Amino acid sequence: MTDASGRAAPVRERLPRAARIRRGSEIRRMFREGRRSRTRSLDLYFRPATHSRPRIGWVVPKLGFRIVDRNLLKRRVRAIGRRRVLTGLEERGCGMDVLVRIRTPAYRATYEQLECEMSAAVEAACSDS
């Protein structure tokens, strides 16, 4: 697909609303009842899926950083969740909800480091369940 100038139009990927953990009560339940996996930059909480498909949510505290940094980190985590985590869970038939909580080192991590940490944690959680 091309735009008016003949360049390739950007592909818009969306994270469907049904694939997101959005409510505060659901997030608190994940913190309380979920199984935690800690990496260098992230805390990931896993719980059996309560809906028909795996879902993902994220908590990105300010931790003294600028809003620009926080938004960049949210976009990175959202993209990794959509492209790697949810597709990986669906391919493995692993029905679980995942909540990602950002830790301070994540603000300095690259996209590749975050992707590697999230993928490894999800793979370990799927093999344990």
Image (spheres, rainbow, N blue to C red):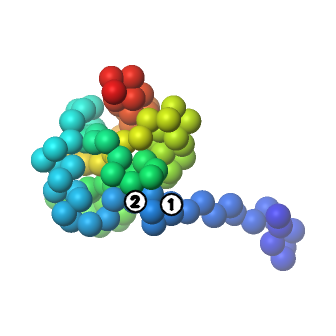
Residue 128 occupies which quadrant of the picture? top left
Q: Kindly check if marks 2 and 1 are in contact, taking CB atoms under 8 A apart as contact.
A: yes
Whether 128 is drawn above or below 3: the answer is above
Whether 25 is drawn above or below 79: the answer is below
Q: Name the amino acid type tagged 2.
A: Arg
Rendering coords of residue 23 (x, y %):
26, 66
Q: Name the amino acid type tagged 1.
A: Leu
In the rendered image, which residue does mark 1 sit on? Answer: 15
Nearer the observer, 27 or 113 = 27
Rendering coords of residue 25 (x, y %):
19, 63
Nearer the observer, 47 or 36 = 47
**In screen coordinates, is 3 left or right of 122?**
right
Q: Residue at x 39, y 54 (%)?
A: 51
Mark 1 packing: few (<14 Cα in 10 Å), some, or many (20+)? some
Residue 76 in sight from this viewpoint:
no
* Secondary-structure class at tag 2: loop
In the rendered image, which residue does mark 2 sit on? Answer: 20
Rendering coords of residue 127 (x, y %):
39, 23
Residue 93 in sight from this viewpoint:
yes
Whether 4 is drawn above or below 72: the answer is below
Residue 13 occupies which quadrant of the picture? bottom right
Residue 103 occupies which quadrant of the picture? top left
If you read the primary sequence from the N terminus, does the residue marked by circle 2 or circle 1 appear first? Answer: 1
